[in-house]
Amino acid sequence: MAVKAEGSKVDCVIIEVDYSRDRPNDWAKQVLRYARIRSRKLVLLARGGAADAFLADLRALSADNMDFPVRMYSGADVEEVAATERCATYEVRRLGDIVNLAAIR
């Protein structure tokens, strides 16, 4: 993760989503809430699975969020995505980390 100033938002939250595993029904809401608090942009890295599942999730995440940028990449490297999206500071998480963090709070 790139260095960020204490109390400030990072440019991007990059979340790795493994589409070969089951995901909770409300995972998109939890991820979006997490990203809005901590960053200026949400970037999903899709691992495994089919493109139709990726696109359905991308549409669901961005449908009601015109003011918050959501991007998705499939099978890309974290550093490559951060450079492409011009993320000077970023945080990388796995979907399971976000869902578990949301359940605790």
Image (cartoon, rainbow, N blue to C red):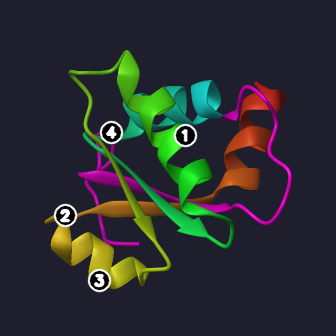
Judge by depth and name the residue closer to the eye, 53 or 22. Answer: 53
Q: Name the residue that disc number 1 marks.
A: 57
**Which is closer to the viewer, label 1 or label 3?**
1
Q: Secondary structure at mark 2?
A: loop
Residue 88, x across and y down, in percent = 17, 66
* Crowd class of label 4 (few under 14; some 14 to 19; many from 20; radius 10 Å): few
- State the residue at coordinates (19%, 76%): 83
Residue 35 placement (x, y as % from top left): 44, 37
- Density class for disc 1 (Cα within 10 Å; few <14, some 14-19, many ≥20) is some
- The C terminus: image quadrant: top right
Q: CA distance from mark 4 to mark 3?
A: 26 Å
Lower position in the chain sequence, tag 1 or tag 3 = 1
Name the residue tied to disc 3: 80
**Mark 4 to mark 1 CA distance (whole Å):** 30 Å
Q: CA distance from mark 4 to mark 2?
A: 22 Å
Q: Amino acid at mark 2?
A: Glu
When the figure is inspected, residue 99 is found, relative to residue 47, above or below; the finding is: above
Q: Which residue position holds label 4?
A: 7
**Percent position (x, y) of residue 58?**
45, 41
C-beta proximity under 8 Å, tags 4 and 3: no
Region rendered in magenta: 1-27
Task: Choose mark 4 or mark 2, whichever is in front.
Answer: 2
Query: Foreground: 4 or 56?
Result: 56
Q: Which residue in the protein does label 2 denote?
A: 85
What's the distance in space between the residues labelled 1 and 2, CA to CA?
19 Å
Q: Quadrant of residue 38?
A: top left
Confirm whether the magenta stretch covers residue 15: yes
User: Residue at (37%, 15%) from the top-left corner?
Assistant: 64
Residue 3 part of the magenta segment: yes
The secondary element bearing badge 3 is classed as helix
Task: Mark 4 vs mark 1: give the one in front.
Answer: 1
Q: Nearer the viewer, residue 33 or 84?
A: 84
